[in-house]
Amino acid sequence: MSDSDAVKESRRVLRSIRDHLTIAHRNLGAERQSVGLVDVTYHPDNRSPYLNYVSPRRKTAWIPGPQIEAGIDQLRDHGRTPRVYYFEGLYPPIFAKTLRELGLTVESETALMACKLDDENMPERPAMPSEMRVEFPETQEGIALWWYVRNNAFYDVITHGTEPIYIGRDLREVVLGNQVDILLYRYSQPVGVARLTFNKSTAHLSALSLMKEIRTPENIKLMYKIALYRAAEQGASLIFTSGETETDRSLSRQVGFVDSGSIVCYAEAPGNVEPEAEDVHVAEPIFILR
């Protein structure tokens, strides 16, 4: 593949990820309004930064500062912190300079990892250790166990991303085929969980957590492999996730993921705005490494 073709493919992957997250946020109740060359995403009941932000409109290559500022003003009118999300790789470096000139500073950067699922890169069914088995809960009891494992202090959250998890929607999303939950057992004890969300042909490994005592590189890779295989079974042609640390990114590379850019967030300095409280119905994203 030539350098030009590689750039085009990278941009195609980033656009697919952007579309997946846009739909995910809308499904969680966020509203989107176009203001000039930017979109303003706003959730009327939840102040999470992942549901309240300004982003460049699709098919825009360059956005003047006043256009961005108009979107920021709209977000501020909703009582939300001025915040801009964009996909590095889809916009030139000077875009970051424009944001800094508006008084914004880098709040976060989320590294993206993606894997194509096609005839040339079709994952094999993972070989399970004899003491382990995997289940895909489809009942309320199974999903409740998923949440128990996820929230238990003995487990480490590994993945980090920008798709909040909505408490109470789980069973509906599973039935609709928009979500697959993964439960890993060691003997009779649940020791790991993962979550896949789907949008058309795109899958997002949005959560991955393992019991601390079995959190080894091999078991982390096993969870990645299970997720890759299940995403392919569901018909996804692309799966993406994110890596908080270089160690996590290295492990995901070993099972087929490749570095695919990042999501950069610029926001107004914390001292200039009031703290943002979370709504109890939309959980804080669970992807923070602990």
Image (cartoon, grey):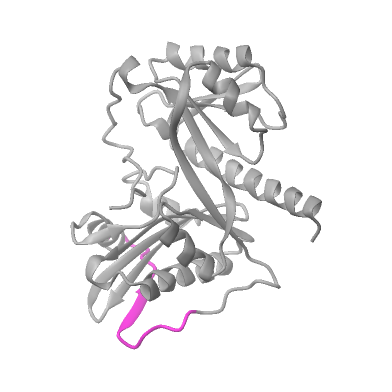
Q: Is residue 275 above or below residue 129?
A: above
Residues drawn in magenta = 126-140
- Quadrant holding the N terminus: bottom right
Q: Is residue 36 visible?
A: yes
Q: Is residue 65 left or right of residue 267?
A: right
Please tell me which residue is depicted at 60% across the width and 52% down the height of the picture.
Answer: 260
Q: Is residue 4 above or below residue 210?
A: above
Quick one: 18 or 232, which is closer to the camera? Answer: 18
Q: Is residue 180 visible?
A: no
Image coordinates of residue 206 in percent, x first then y, are 44, 53
Please tell me which residue is depicted at 34% across the width and 63% down the height of the picture.
Answer: 193
Quick one: 62 or 18, which is closer to the camera? Answer: 62
Please tell me which residue is depicted at 40% across the width and 23% down the height of the picture.
Answer: 44
* In the image, residue 245 lies in the stretch drawn in magenta: no
Image coordinates of residue 106 in percent, x first then y, are 46, 30
Image coordinates of residue 49 in percent, x first then y, are 40, 31
Please tell me which residue is depicted at 45% across the width and 42% down the height of the picture.
Answer: 162
Image coordinates of residue 128 in percent, x first then y, are 40, 83
Quick one: 50 or 265, which is closer to the camera? Answer: 265
Q: Is residue 165 left or right of residue 121?
A: left
Quick one: 43 or 118, which is closer to the camera? Answer: 118
